[in-house]
Amino acid sequence: MDSLKEVLQYLYEHNTLTKKEAKSVLTDISKEKFNEMQVCSFMSVYNMRSITPEELAGFMEALIDLAIPLSIDPSDKIDMCGTGGDGKNTFNISTLSSVVLAASGIKVTKHGNYGVSSACGSSNVLEALGYKFTKDEDRLKRELEACNICFLHAPLFHPALKFVGKIRRSLAVKTFFNMLGPLVNPVQPQYQSVGVFSLKLQRLYKHIFEKTIKQYSVMYDLGGYDEASLTGITKCIRNNGEHLVNPEDFGYKTYKSEDIFGGNTIEEAKLIFENVLNNNAPQAHIETVSANVALAMQLYKPENTLVDLAEEAKELITSGKAKSNFEKLLNLSN
């Protein structure tokens, strides 16, 4: 197919793309070969029908090939992120969890972006807290060495998506790009703890991850959250099978959805972030972060129970260790 018009007609007739075709189309979109209306129509197709594993894999390959590469050893690194798009507007659970996890000594290369379908994305809150984004490899390596964490702001590493970003912001709803974010980390870390917004997407991620050497945990909270929310049961798909996890498995009680609301502004999100690290937040916030950290830790320590790991994670907050490590990171970034 030589034009996006042909591709759109093909898709409107209920056909699907091969992996190679999907890769080719997204590569051409990223190179701004098509107009905004055509790209908007293409993105909308996947809000009306499910994306196939081949299409998702093709889109993923296109973005990885177009990304600015980093020569950071992926073998012991982890990315913790959610796809976004769950519409729940929780506080920044995966970003806080990444900060706490780094204080344990596990090295985190966190990939993130500004919020599209929520009030405050990972990059919004980090920017508000004073972290300076960079694509300078030496600085990122220094941050990893000193603080076990660095943040990879997606637009810096995927410049080809600048064109698409404008359209996504105009649409202000989740698109298949939400599905791609966690898959296209430029480091391609060997460990991944990722939350998704649907059971269908969870199965798609399993299909992609099981073809790699990753140690992975793909979470979907059955209440509709793209992380373990402690409001109910979370389904986890890992290398060793599928598991249902309850709040009691961490030694915690079940919370209500309003207990983990993230506020309506970036300033509110920043305050919640600071309160958690200051150990001055509601238990719902501290324990939700600790639970997500525990799930990530278990990829490295499969012999440990979630209760023990959640206790270890919580202690990183209550002792101030996570806060001081994050402050050190902010100083390095400036």
Image (cartoon, grey):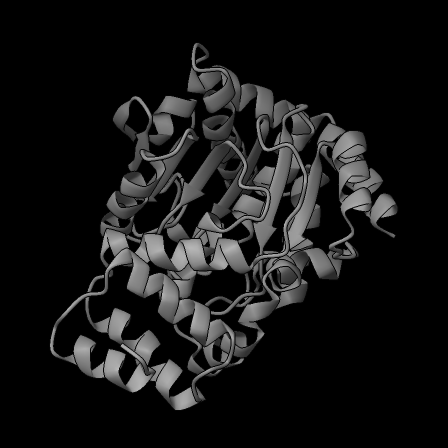
Q: Is residue 10 left or right of residue 307?
A: left
Residue 174 visible in the current orientation: no
Please tell me in which quadrant of the rendered image residue 140 appears: top right
Q: Residue at x 86, y 44 (%)?
A: 332
Residue that protrudes farthest toward the top in the picture: 303
Farthest left residue in view: 13
The residue shown at (12%, 73%) is 14
Q: Residue at x 24, y 48 (%)?
A: 199
Q: Report the residue at 54% width, 70% height from top.
A: 161
Q: Is residue 195 above or below residue 213?
A: below
Q: Quadrant of the N terminus?
A: bottom left
Q: Is residue 14 above or below residue 270?
A: below
* Spot occupied by residue 9 in the image (x, y as percentages of width and height): 19, 83
* Residue 87 placement (x, y as % from top left): 38, 63
Determine if residue 34 is in view.
yes
165 relative to 270 in the view: left or right: left
Near-viewer residue (44 or 199): 44
Q: Where residue 45 appears, x then y in whole percent?
A: 25, 75
Number of marks in the rendered image: 0
Looking at the image, which is closer to me, 77 or 98?
77
Question: Residue 188: x percent and y percent?
Answer: 53, 41
Residue lying at the far front in this picture: please name it: 2
167 relative to 158, above or below:
below
Q: In the rendered view, does 270 fall on the left or right side of 287?
A: right
